[in-house]
Image: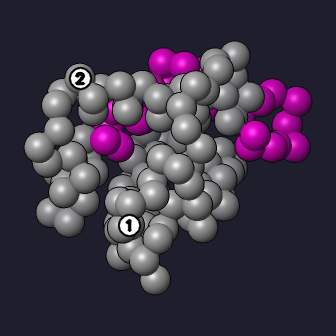
């Protein structure tokens, strides 16, 4: 779970489910439009991609203190075999940062979200 010094959970400070879902939708559009990262979505059915996006929303909501339950696989199992490398990671994080900024997420909350994702890096990046 993403922790905070505030009495409100990060989930609440981010604006709850609808705000997190909107950020995820915008982020996914950016990633799917990225020349290098789109390979992870090429030749995939729209239903599978939509399910993955919903699981990401659930994961982020649950991890930030929201009432959702994440039913997907852990990050290592989910990303194994995808051969994500350091450049993929940096590009995805840049898209996340840009998306958070475009939604005008306050600095403290943005830093918490970015830090949370950085802590997942070792579970996601496979190729040095």
Range covered by the magenta-colored residues: 1-28
Asked if the stretch drawn in magenta spans residue 67, the answer is no
Q: Disc 1 or 2, which lies upstream in sequence?
A: 2
Percent across and percent down for residue 71 are: 58, 25
**Counting other residues with Cα less than 10 Å from the Cα at mark 1, is it few (<14), some (14-19), or many (20 or more)?**
some
Say how many tags the image has: 2
- Cα distance in 3D space between marks 1 and 2: 23 Å
Q: Quadrant of the N terminus?
A: top right
Residue 50 located left or right of residue 62? left
Q: Which residue is mark 2?
A: 47
Where 37 sits versus 22, above or below? Answer: below
Point out residue 27 in the picture as x, y percentages from the top left corner.
35, 43
Our reading of the magenta stretch's main secondary structure is helix
Q: Determine the residue positioned at 60% across, 67% down.
A: 122
Disc sitting over residue 111 in the figure: none
| Mark 1 lies on residue | 84
- Give percent across and percent down for residue 38: 19, 54
Q: Is residue 66 above or below residue 42?
A: above
Question: In the rendered image, which quarter is residue 65 located in?
Answer: top right
Q: Quadrant of residue 127?
A: bottom left
Locate residue 55, reporting x and y percent.
47, 29
Residue drawn where x is 65% and y is 45% of the image: 109
Depth order, front residue of 111/62: 62
- The answer to whether marks 1 and 2 mark residues whose Cβ atoms lie closer than 8 Å is no
Asked if residue 13 lies in the magenta stretch, the reply is: yes
Q: Secondary structure at mark 1?
A: loop
Q: Secondary structure at mark 2?
A: helix
Relative to 15, 88 lies left or right: left
For this rendering, which residue is in front, 109 or 83?
Answer: 83
Q: Looking at the image, which residue sits at the far left?
A: 43
């Amino acid at each position: 779970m993403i922790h905070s010094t505030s009495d409100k959970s990060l989930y609440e400070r981010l604006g709850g489910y609808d705000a997190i879902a909107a950020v995820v939708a915008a982020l996914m559009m950016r990633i799917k439009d990225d020349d290098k990262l789109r390979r992870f979505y090429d030749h995939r059915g729209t239903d599978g991609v939509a399910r993955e996006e919903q699981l990401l929303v659930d994961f982020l909501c649950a991890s930030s203190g929201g009432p959702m339950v994440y039913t997907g696989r852990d990050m290592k199992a989910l990303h194994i075999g995808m051969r994500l490398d350091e450049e993929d990671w940096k590009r995805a994080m840049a898209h996340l940062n840009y998306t958070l900024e475009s939604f005008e997420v306050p600095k403290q909350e943005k830093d918490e979200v970015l830090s949370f994702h950085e802590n997942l890096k070792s579970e996601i990046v496979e190729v040095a």
